[in-house]
Amino acid sequence: MIPAGTYRANENGKLDISGIFNGYYYKDGMIIKGAGIVISKGSIYFVRTDGSVFTSGKLDVKTAKTNGLIEAGTYSFDDTGKLIR
């Protein structure tokens, strides 16, 4: 679920939201599953196969999931899912 608030719908009737909301990655109002590394509001996240973001730990990010945004390697993520630099 997305946070309570006022949202716009696009011409197709889909919610016009994209980014991380309640621990899930949305694009054009839909949960996107298995996206790997994404950037939302200037922060880097890892999106898992269920659409949730990886939180609170270290993760070995393979080249196929970097989306060209970072190099493959082991990274730490905080309790909100943001990559810790």
Image (spheres, grey):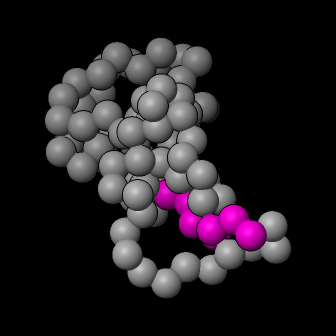
Q: Does residue 71 appear in this view?
A: no
The residue furthest bottom is: 6
> Which picture quadrant has residue 63?
top right
Q: Is residue 70 left or right of residue 60?
A: right
x then y, percent, for residue 39? 49, 49
x then y, percent, for residue 75? 29, 27
The residue furthest right is: 11
Looking at the picture, does residue 61 appear above or below residue 52?
Answer: above
User: In front: 44, or 54?
Assistant: 54
65 in magenta? no
Look at the image and give the residue range highlighted in magenta: 13-19
Q: Is residue 31 left or right of residue 56?
A: right
x then y, percent, for residue 36? 50, 31
Q: Does residue 22 appear in this view?
A: yes
> What secondary structure is the stretch in magenta mostly built from?
loop
**Residue found at x 24% / y 31%:** 76
